[in-house]
Image (tube, rainbow, N blue to C red):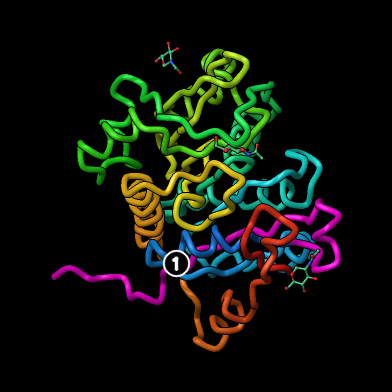
Amino acid sequence: LVLQYPAQTSFSGILTQEVQDPDMKPYGRTYIPSSYVKYIESGGGRVIPISSVEFLNGRCLCSLFDRLLLIGGTVDLQTSDFAHAAKIYFRLALKANDVGDYFPIWGTCLGFQLLTVLVAEENLLSKTPAENISLPLNFTSGGAASSRMFEAFPPELLTALSQEALAANFHHFGVTDQMFMRNEKLRSFFSVLSLNKAENGVVFVSTMEGRKYPFYGVQWHPEVNRFQWNPLYSFPHSRNAERMSSLLAEFFVNEGRRSSHHFIQAEEESKELIYNYNPLYVANFTSYEQIYFF
Ligand SMILES: *[C@@H]1O[C@H](CO)[C@@H](O)[C@H](O)[C@H]1NC(C)=O
Ligand SMILES: *[C@@H]1O[C@H](CO)[C@@H](O)[C@H](O)[C@H]1NC(C)=O
Ligand SMILES: *[C@@H]1O[C@H](CO)[C@@H](O)[C@H](O)[C@H]1NC(C)=O
């Protein structure tokens, strides 16, 4: 007899980030672009926004969701509330995983960079500009083929990912492959699955996954392929781009199904879910279509 986790245990925490953009400030103190929420929902998960500010004031929903997503953005990797809250969750996640309580973390773009800072315990970023440019993933030998992240990808889709410009990059900084390989902590913690070349010719790590821990990082943005449409930006929407985005969302949601975290009462659960908030239409003053403000 195989016991299935009940569907209602599938919650993703998404840490909210301080608003930096002056145009967005009137609407809230922290935010989550809707594209990240839709990404999780499209993978079959439900979202709980975790306020980085409330969290630092002692409100911990720690045992109530079964995976954490760290979004992209612009805040400081060491001094922001976002970074402080992520650091505490990161440590809790290490401890949880160490005692067999499976707890995955996914970092996208700034979230990826934050994972490298948390593991290396120092900021190893340097200039790797790739702003508004989509690239094919340069898979490391054996990297994708033996990874968990790309395990469910059909071979022809992996080939497409390595040949077609499907991975949307929006960053100025990153971790170079040389820096990564020189740093013992990073090297022993993460396997590098793909590399890419920045506009200045420097090679940066674009995809990584934890060797032991279920922690995953993409310097690029798989959520934009299906959920961002601003014609001023390079958001690949080909069939292969959408399949790649779907499979990664499903992968991450599925990782959380292995967790045993859950709400004790349905009432408690309903109060925390993203459905208590309405996203705002922001396409006329940001590069996003919709944003949740808190
Ligand atoms: C692809 O990765 C290899 C190392 O695996 C590196 O030598 C090469 O420069 C990379 N090419 C690009 C275009 O990123
Ligand atoms: C982003 O890239 C696309 C595709 O290359 C290009 O058409 C567009 O002008 C760029 N947008 C900005 C704001 O640089
Ligand atoms: C953007 O559009 C919304 C809804 O149409 C409107 O309320 C808001 O004032 C607009 N914002 C700007 C900065 O144009």
Quadrant for the N terminus, please: bottom left
- Outermost left residue: 1
Q: Is residue 83 or residue 207 the one in the foreground? A: 207
- Relative horizontal placement of residue 272, taking residue 167 as reference (left or right): right
Residue 177 position in % (x across, y down): 52, 17
Q: Which residue is mark 1?
A: 41
Residue 15 visible in the current orientation: yes
Q: Is residue 76 magenta?
A: no
- Outermost bottom residue: 267
Q: Which residues are magenta?
A: 1-30
At x 68%, y 21%, the residue is 126
The answer to whether the residue bearing label 1 lies less than 8 angstroms from the nearest atom of ligand 3 is no
Residue 59 position in % (x across, y down): 72, 68
Q: Residue 107 occupies which quadrant of the picture?
A: top right
Quadrant for the C terminus, please: bottom right
Estimate how packed mark 1 is, as few (under 14), some (14 to 19) or many (20 or more) residues with alpha carbons within 10 Å: some
- Relative horizontal placement of residue 16, taking residue 213 as reference (left or right): right
* Figure quarter occupied by ligand 1: top left
Which kind of residue does numbered mark 1 sit on?
Glu
Q: Is residue 118 or residue 109 the one in the foreground? A: 109
Residue 289 position in % (x across, y down): 62, 62
At x 72%, y 61%, the residue is 284
- Relative horizontal placement of residue 56, taking residue 66 as reference (left or right): right
At x 84%, y 61%, the residue is 25
Whether 91 is drawn above or below 269: the answer is above
Q: Mark 1: which secondary structure?
A: helix
